[in-house]
């Protein structure tokens, strides 16, 4: 069991273990969402937590943003089960979420006000640096991102814009070394506004993308 913001997160299905860097940026992103919700007067904001793993991000959204609805998306059956367990553990009403087992956006049909993504992003070239405990305890599918660690980031950014409502915002976690490559992908995919932010260790860790 782990704490993520004000949520209890069970990890018994052996999914990705939430990181403190993620907790740090999600807290900031939630503040941003609240401001945006007030600014554009959103009544029932629709969120997507894609690559959701334990469900920690989406559950933090549901616990901290009034009237929010979250779609959780993961390809791994263990993650799907884990998300279900954690939603119950945190007493979230079933009217407020859907869990979709999907290869990124394959089975996702809706559009969202906010998309949160923490894709697998460890680069093939940096496999040697991965701690033994990660290799042993967390499934490779949850952290390995192929060449440059960009396999899922590319696929995600290609589609994400088609699933964003007007005034929508995307928040995505990255590896600090991916900043330049991610910037290139964002430009290639015609995203106009984006800004990179640092984590608590002063490393570039997340990007905010908006209309
Ligand atoms: C880095 S973990 C993030 C977990 C959680 N959101 C967090 O922040 O702690 C990435 C997740 O993406 C999922 N995943 C990997 N490939 C996927 C794909 N093609 N489509 C959807 N989810 C995928 C993995 O199963 C894993 O749960």
Image (cartoon, rainbow, N blue to C red):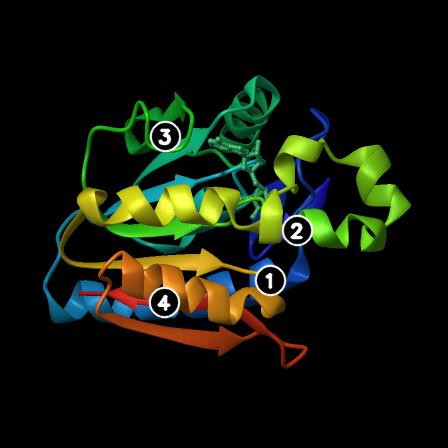
Residue drawn at (32%, 57%) of the image: 170
Q: Which residue is mark 1?
A: 175
Residue 93 shows which numbered tag?
3
Report how far apart the C-alphas of labels 4 and 3 lie in the structure.
29 Å
The answer to whether residue 201 shows anywhere in this view is: yes
Q: Position of residue 17 (x, y in %)?
A: 69, 43
Residue topped by disc 4: 208
The label nearer to you, 4 versus 1, is 1
- Residue 73 picture quarter: top left
Of residue 170 and residue 126, the one placed in the foreground of this image is 126
- Identify the residue at horizontal 69%, vertical 24% (top origin): 13
Q: Which residue occupies the foreground of this view, 37 or 130? A: 130
First along the sequence among labels 3 and 2: 3
Height in image: 205 above or below 96? below
Mark 4: give few (<14), some (14-19) or many (20+) Cα within 10 Å: some
Q: Nearer the viewer, mark 2 or mark 4?
A: 2
Q: Secondary structure at mark 3?
A: loop
Q: Position of residue 204 (x, y in %)?
A: 56, 74
- Mark closer to the observer (4, 3): 4
In space, the residues marked 3 and 2 are separated at their CA atoms by 38 Å
Question: Judging from the image, what secondary structure is the residue with disc 2 in?
Answer: loop
Give the CA distance from mark 1 to mark 2.
9 Å
Horizontally, residue 150 falls left or right of residue 127, namely left
- Seen from the viewer's position, the closer of residues 200 and 182 is 182
Which badge, 4 or 1, comes first in the chain's sequence? 1
Q: Residues within 10 Å of mark 3 (few under 14, many from 20)?
A: few
Q: Which mark is residue 123?
A: 2
Rendered residue at 73%/27% (across/down): 12
User: CB of mark 1 within 8 Å of CB of mark 2?
Assistant: yes
């Amino acid at each position: 069991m782990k704490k993520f913001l004000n949520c209890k997160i069970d990890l018994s299905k052996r999914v990705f273990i939430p990181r403190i860097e993620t907790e740090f940026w999600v807290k900031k992103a939630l503040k941003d969402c609240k401001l945006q919700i007030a600014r554009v007067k959103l009544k029932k904001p629709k969120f997507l937590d894609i690559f959701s793993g334990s469900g920690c991000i989406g559950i933090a959204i549901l616990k901290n943003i009034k009237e929010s609805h979250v779609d959780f998306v993961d390809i791994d059956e263990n993650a799907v089960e884990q998300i279900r367990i954690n939603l119950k553990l945190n007493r979230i009403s079933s009217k407020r979420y859907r869990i979709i087992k999907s290869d990124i956006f394959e089975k996702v049909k809706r559009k969202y006000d906010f998309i949160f993504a923490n894709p697998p992003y460890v680069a093939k070239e940096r496999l040697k640096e991965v701690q033994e405990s990660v290799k042993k305890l967390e499934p490779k599918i949850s952290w390995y991102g192929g060449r440059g660690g960009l396999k899922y980031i590319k696929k995600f950014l290609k589609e994400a814009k088609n699933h964003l409502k007007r005034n929508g915002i995307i928040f995505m976690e990255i590896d600090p070394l991916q900043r330049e490559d991610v910037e290139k992908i964002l430009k290639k995919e015609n995203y106009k506004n984006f800004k990179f932010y640092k984590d608590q260790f002063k490393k570039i860790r997340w990007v905010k993308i908006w209309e």
